[in-house]
Structures are given as structure tokens and as C-alpha cells.
Image (tube, rainbow, N blue to C red):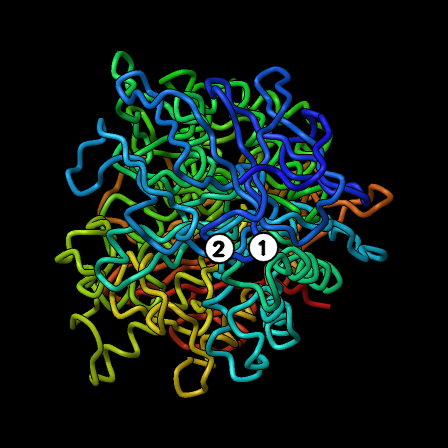
Amino acid sequence: MTSTVRVWPGSPQPLGATFDGEGTNFSIFSRHARSVELSLFDHAESETASARVTLPEVTDNVWHCYLPDVRPGQLYGYRVDGPYSPAEGHRFNAAKLLLDPYAKAISGTVQWNEAQFGYEVQSRDDLQQDFRDSAGAMPKSVVVDQTFPWAGDEAPDIPWSRTVIYECHVKGMTQLHPDVPAALRGTYLGLATDPILDHLLSLGVTAIELLPVHQFVSETHLHQRGLRNYWGYSSIGYFAPDVRYATGHTGEQVADFKTMVKRFHAAGIEVILDVVYNHTGEGNHLGPTLCFRGVDNHSYYRHIPGDPRHCLDYTGTGNSLNTPDARVMQLVLDSLRYWVGEMHVDGFRFDLATTLAREPFDYHRDARFFEIIRQDPVLSRVKLIAEPWDLGHNGYQVGNFPVGWAEWNGKYRDSVRRFWRGDSHQTSDLAYRLSGSSDLYESSGRTPYSSVNVVTVHDGFTLRDLVTYQQKHNEANGEGNRDGTDDNNSRNWGAEGATDDPAIIAQRRQMQRNFLATLAFSQGIPMLLAGDEFGRTQGGNNNAYCQDNPLSWVHWAPDERDDQLLAFTQQVLAIRRLNPVLRRRTFFHGRPIPEAGVKDIQWIRPDGREMAAEDWGDGRSHVLGMLIHGSATDERDLRGHLITGQTMLLLLNGDARARHFVLPELTEAGVWIEVVDTARQETRVIRSARAELLAHSLMLLRRDLQP
């Protein structure tokens, strides 16, 4: 079918489909294409285009046109012709309808069909081209109207020193909530309803970190097992909010997402997106042709040197996005700027961020990706969080990201888990983690807020499962329990899985309190996993990426949550929020505070004396005290006046027996008030010179001055 619409030359910029109030400009990059055809569709399920336009102009490898008659809601896709030569890295196939890499909305999810593969999939021979038309099996890109009533929206702009992050899934957070309207459960709008906002505010959460909301695909191997991708780490549209979480018609997901952000901002909560720019959902050389592979495989993906037929894979997913290429880097940066400028998000957590800084193969702390962001007037001002590792050589880069970046601190997670599990030789490393991980960040000019402190995240055990299982139980994933990590540093405290033994149940609840209190009282940025605050379980599944069902969803029913644990979580986070010595912006140095005559931090032995060098080498020690003087604050008000905190003594006993802890003597008169005791759960004045710390417990004491 030939074009039945008016076609003007248009502009190469901006990339994507841009409605200007009268018509729509279409623009797509392809360095190696011979021709590009734009197909317009009347319905999302259409197999045949209502109009086909050969893009008439090419400017700097960008193909473009302007259609004065096309308005928002128009469905479209591309067919890109060029060489089908996998041995040379080219996989063009004009029989395959492609999503626009810059699509702002996508009509639906990918419904798997063999026609979506560019080669003869039955033979698994990617050298043999497949000529079946894939249009009927493909969702369509959507022209959107970006106008939105943003008036009154203000970014909360929460300083790192007051940030508390809550990681959750849009659908999983609301799908089972009885007070969220049924029509809104599992959606962007449902996430921003009062029951969810009230819950987050009761915890003191300042930022919600959403698992991927970019449009993603559910892999074919999951489809074959009757499962589907739940987490969303399989992006196919870096500008499009995933249609799965929309409430309205095609294209409405954009307005829904913006409404959600505006409501979070009105509540004083920031929105951080988990983004996956390290790979796409098209997989390895045997994967489908949905978007980037068909637009320009050679440009968009990294390939093995000397073997461009095969993808270079640092991610474990089959491919790695070719960010060293200038146009691919532009895609990433354009996407980031779009989500900040147009969608008003407040920051990003970068999945497998090490991959983005491989130039071309090794990680570089001064990589072009970092340098561009640091100089960008928009991106340099938002929250930037790295998952500081990938699966490639030398991929573990915790502590080695540049100034301005925070990191998921994997060493914090491992140290805290091992200490509370009862491992030996942990107190020295734990001291670093409690005080902000200066060993990782200080020498490069970074701060305690470079460390996002995590005990549990979506990838792994929930907090309840961490103290309930010693082995993973991933049978429901259909991979013979081979998927997911075996390195969990967990302990079941007497029985594997659920039990009726009251002593084991009590011990597990105490251990959950230990983890939550440790997280709240550590320097750095605390991050909670959704549901950990009241004991959510996944039945021991530590890789629930394909469990889009009640196993992964948050259960809100009173008989399925631990309200005492919820109250405890609220308590410890409130203590953190109210005392600036627990959230310093700079590192401790163990030096005297001139006006106070005491050190900013002291590490205390059970006999009340300060730790000596030889004490740190005692691998049998499971007890540690951290004393922070109230003057050891670096928080100031708007006029620069120092905000004094309260002197706090944190005592941790990872031993299997109770220990007596001699309370340190201070120069000022006063009494010690027991604020938190994870074993007793009571508040009292300590009248004696020592405190009894029960086995596997944590105690926080506050110094109150006598009148």
C-alpha cells in the first residue's frame, strides 16, 4: 500500500514521533539502513497498515518526515531495509514491524509469534532469513500529546542526609491492597492513592524507588513455561511507561504516570526509577527482532571483537547495549532527560551500571557516560544511584563510582548479614558499615551518602525469608531450583521454613528487628524493600522475577502482616529522622570535638573502654559498641547554625549468649535512657553502670542530661 497522507520533509530532530500541535514529525536513526518505511495503523491488532510512507529525507544517518495530518493516538511502526548479513553484524529484515526506539507510548505487550524472529526459528539457524510479516503479532508505537497540567508541581528536592528510600513494584504494591479501589489496583494511579501514601508517610519514606517501568518484554522461555516477567528488567522502550500499569486507553499510560508523580510530589515524596540501559529485551543472536535489532543491530549492540554475529554479553541476558557508540549514548541520555524534564522524576537507579562505563571493555571511573552526566545541567542535579557491578571481567566496582553518585552498597548487605548470622571476624568490617563505609568512599572525596545501605532488595530473600531459610526455594520458577544465588548469608534459626515452634518464631522476629534497627542507625542512606516492614514472605524464593502472582505481591491483610514489626520500623526510622548524629553528611574521624572535649565517635568494648588496635583483630568477638556524641553533628539550619543532636550509644551483640556491657563514663552528668532493645522491646532508664545485652540483640541508648 502506498501513502495516502501528505508527506513533508520534516526534521531530523528531535528523534521519535513529535506532535507539535498541528502535525507530527517522525525521525529515526539508522546508520546502515538502505531505506526506512513508516507504517500507520488504525488498530493495535492490525496486520495491514492503513498507510505506508517511505521516509524521504536522511540527515546524518537520521531518516525523517513530517505528516501534517497525523495527530495523537496514531499507531505506527517502522520497517527498515538493509543487508541481512549476521556474520557482519547486520540483521535488517523489512518483513518485521519494529517499535520506534523513541516511542513515548506502546499500544500493548509483545504476544509471542515465530514471525517476530528475523531468522528461521524452527531450524535455529540465524543465517537463514525469515520473510514472514510480523505486524499482526506486534504492539504498535503511539503518537502522544505531551500536554499535562503540571501547574503547582514542585520537586520535593530532599537532601541525601534526610533521604529514606522504599523499593517497590507498581503492581505488587497495590494488587492486594483492600483499601485501594479495585479498578486502580496494580496501576500507576493505584500506587498514588491515599492508603499507599499514608503508609509511606507513616514510615518516614522520602523517596519511592520503582522497579522498571520502561516498557519491557516477557521472555519466550517464560511464555513456554506459563510464566511471565514480573520485575521488568527486559526493556524494549526507554521512553514509554509500561502499558501494563495503565488504567485507560492506548497512550493513557503517559498521563497516568505523570499524575502519579504529581501526587507523590504533593505528599513530599520523590520518585526514583530503576532503569535498565545495560541491555534490552531482544536477547542474544537467537533473540527476536522487535526494535533495536531491526533498526540497526550493528550500531545498537556490542559484539564480540572479530565475530559480529554474536553479542558481547556483560549482563547475563544475551546482549549489552553499545553505549560507546555516540548515537546509542544519545539514546540513553535523551531518555534520562525526557524522564526528568517531561515526566518530572527525581532520580534513577542504574541496573548493572558498570556496563555503562566499559570503554570499550574495561570499566573506567572517568568514562564518558559519567563525564557527560556530570556536565549536564539537568541530569547532574537529580539523584543518581548505581548498582555497581555487572557480570563481566572485573565487574564488581563497589566504592569505585565517581563523586555525585550513590551506590547500592553490597558490602554493607554482606557484612550486616554475616554479623547477625553469627559469623566470626565481622566486627571490624561492621564498624565501617555502621559509620558510612569510609573505607570505600572517603579517599575519593565522596560522603556517607554515597552508600545506599541495603539488607534486602527485590533480588534475593525478603527480610522475613532471610531469617527463615538457609537455602533458596525457587522450584516455582521451573528451572529445577538452579536459578538465583546460593550466597545468601541467611540463617533459619532452627528449622527450614515455616514452623509452629514459638521459640524459633520469637527468635526470627527478633532478628528482623535487629536488621531493621541496624539499617536505621547506620550512617548513609537506608533503603527498605516493600513489605519488609511487616514481614512479607516469598516462601524462600530468592529470584521471583517471573512470579507475577501473590507470591511476589505485598499482602496487606491484618492476618498476613506483623503489625508489631511495622510499629517497630516506624519507631527506628523516626529516631533516625529526629537525631542528626545518625545521618551525618561527612565521615567521622575519631577526633576530639573542641567544644565538647570528646571524640566525634568512639568504638566501645564490653568493659566500657575504647577499642584498641588489638581488639579489632579478635575474630571471636561478636560484641560492638558505637558511641556518638551529640555535638558530633554536621547538620546546619538555613542560616548556617549547627543543629546539635543527642548523644547515642549503639550496642550490638551477635553472640549466642547474653553479655554485660559497662556503660562509658561521660564528662557531663546525665542518665542513659534505653530507647530501643530488640530483645525486650521496652523503654527504660538504666540505673546501673552496665546494661545487659541479651543474645542476638541490639540496644540503642540516649544520654539525657540531669537538671
The residue that mark 2 highlights is 46
Q: Where is residue 577 shown, x and y percent of the image?
A: 64, 59
Q: Where is residue 539 shown, x and y percent of the image?
A: 26, 70
Taking depth in this image into account, of 532 and 42 the one nearest to the observer is 42
Q: Secondary structure at mark 1?
A: loop
- Distance between mark 2 and mark 1 Cα atoms: 7 Å
Q: Which residue is drawn at the image coordinates 60% and 24% (left, top)? A: 63
Q: Where is residue 48 shown, x and y percent of the image?
A: 48, 49
Taking depth in this image into account, of 459 and 607 the one nearest to the observer is 459
Q: Which residue is drawn at the image coordinates 28% and 22% (left, top)? A: 86
Outermost bottom residue: 559
Three-letter code, disc 1: Asp
Taking depth in this image into account, of 579 and 147 the one nearest to the observer is 147
Labels in figure, total: 2
Residue 629 visible, this angle:
no
The residue that mark 1 highlights is 42
Question: Does residue 335 lie above or below 549 as drawn?
Answer: above
Taking depth in this image into account, of 318 and 646 the one nearest to the observer is 318
Q: Secondary structure at mark 2?
A: loop
Three-letter code, disc 2: Ser
Determine whether label 2 and label 1 are within 8 Å by CB. Answer: yes
